[in-house]
Amino acid sequence: MASHSQTTYTISDLAREFDLTTRAIRFYEDMGLLQPERSGPGGRNRVYSSRDRTRLKLTLRAKRLGLSLTEAKDIIDMYDSPRDTGPQLRKFLAILAAHRQQMEEQMAELQANLEEVRTHEKEARGLLARLEKDKADKVRA
């Protein structure tokens, strides 16, 4: 059991703080992202450390960046590791570069779609203006 000087969290604490289901947190644990200690009868209660909380926060940030959980785990393990981080940082940069490229392509596609929508809007406004003008002309005639 962790000493009192170190803050610990229950699964409900983390679920509340990060707006997750306890099921999602157990899934991250199954993936090896979190390693809570067990307490209580039959080790049924999970006790999360500050390190677990930080790893969860990094996992959610990586997910927002569009990284897979496996990629997230690799990167988080790398930050956690006392080993030489040069090779790991190069791997992280490669993963980020690939994701940036993917996002830039999606953004270019969105820009093109947006242009198309603007063109259609302009054409539709023109047609509507002509229809209303014709209608007004007919009323006057």
Image (cartoon, rainbow, N blue to C red):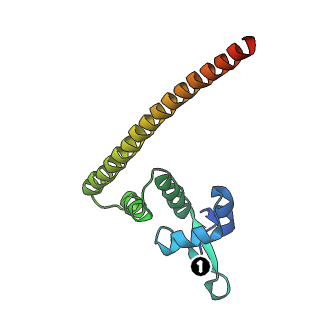
Residue depicted at 62% across the width and 71% down the height: 23
Q: Which residue is mark 1?
A: 38
Q: Taking 13 as reference, is 46 above or below it? A: below
User: What is the total number of numbered labels drawn onto the structure image?
Assistant: 1
**Position of 77 compared to 34: left or right?**
left
Across and down, in percent, residue 6 comes to 59, 63
Across and down, in percent, residue 72 comes to 42, 60
Q: Nearer the viewer, residue 3 or 12?
A: 12
Please name the amino acid that badge 1 sits on: Arg
* Residue that lies at the very extreme toward the front in this rendered image: 141
Residue depicted at 40% across the width and 41% down the height: 109
- Where, by quadrant of the figure, is residue 111 drawn? top left
Badge 1: residue crowd in 10 Å (few <14, some 14–19, many ≥20)? some
Across and down, in percent, residue 29 comes to 52, 72
Visible residue check, residue 42? yes
Residue depicted at 42% across the width and 39% down the height: 107
Q: Nearer the viewer, residue 116 or 105?
A: 116
**Position of 9 compared to 92: left or right?**
right
**Position of 125 compared to 64: left or right?**
right
Residue depicted at 63% across the width and 57% down the height: 18
Across and down, in percent, residue 38 comes to 59, 79
